[in-house]
Image (cartoon, helix red, strand yellow):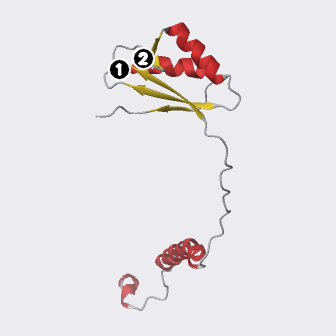
Amino acid sequence: MTAMRRLRLPDRAMSEINITPLIDVMLALLVIFMIAAPIMTGTIHLPYGSAPKPGPPPKILELSIAADGTVSGHGMTLNELELQAQLLAFAANPAGGILQLQPDRATHHQRLVDVLSLARTAGLQSITIESPAP
């Protein structure tokens, strides 16, 4: 009969408390408060920017690329050597400048990549590509 009594222990009050869920909730609250506390303090000090120094506007070299891949600038069609020479002369300007490419909608992407490669080889750093008007 003593064996049966030992099996009936759940009828008695449990003397242990499982605190694992309590610890999980407390850790979650701690993380939330650690994230929220800096936000609740109010101000965030950011450095002030400076205004750009006024100076002459940068020179712009506009080149358009036609659908058949021909490159033209200043109303003249340029072959590969003329294009390289013009890009090198423009890159030699100590004040720098911006190369502005205007490809046609039907221009093959490879031709645009070739012109970009020539510009990078010439040493140009500022290059923009304008999308053609619809």
Where residue 12 sits: x, y (%)? 40, 91
**On the rendered image, what quadrant is the N terminus found in?**
bottom left
Residue 108 vs 49, above or below: the answer is: above
Residue found farthest to the bottom:
13
Q: Nearer the viewer, residue 11 or 119?
A: 119
Mark 2, Cα crowd under 10 Å, few <14 / some 14-19 / many 20+, is: some
Q: Nearer the viewer, residue 38 or 67?
A: 67
Q: Is residue 111 left or right of residue 19?
A: left
* Residue under numbered circle 1: 107
User: In the rendered structure, which amino acid carries the disc numbered 2?
Assistant: Arg
Q: Residue at x 35, y 24 (%)?
A: 104
- Contact (Cβ within 8 Å) of mark 2 with mark 1: yes
Q: Is residue 50 left or right of residue 130?
A: right
Q: Residue at x 46, y 27 (%)?
A: 101
Q: Secondary structure at mark 2?
A: helix
Where residue 96 sits: x, y (%)? 65, 31
Q: Nearer the viewer, residue 113 or 57?
A: 57
Q: Nearer the viewer, residue 19 or 81?
A: 81
* Residue under numbered circle 2: 111
Q: Residue at x 59, y 13 (%)?
A: 85
Q: Quadrant of residue 45?
A: bottom right
Q: Is residue 96 left or right of residue 6?
A: right
Where residue 57 sits: x, y (%)? 61, 40
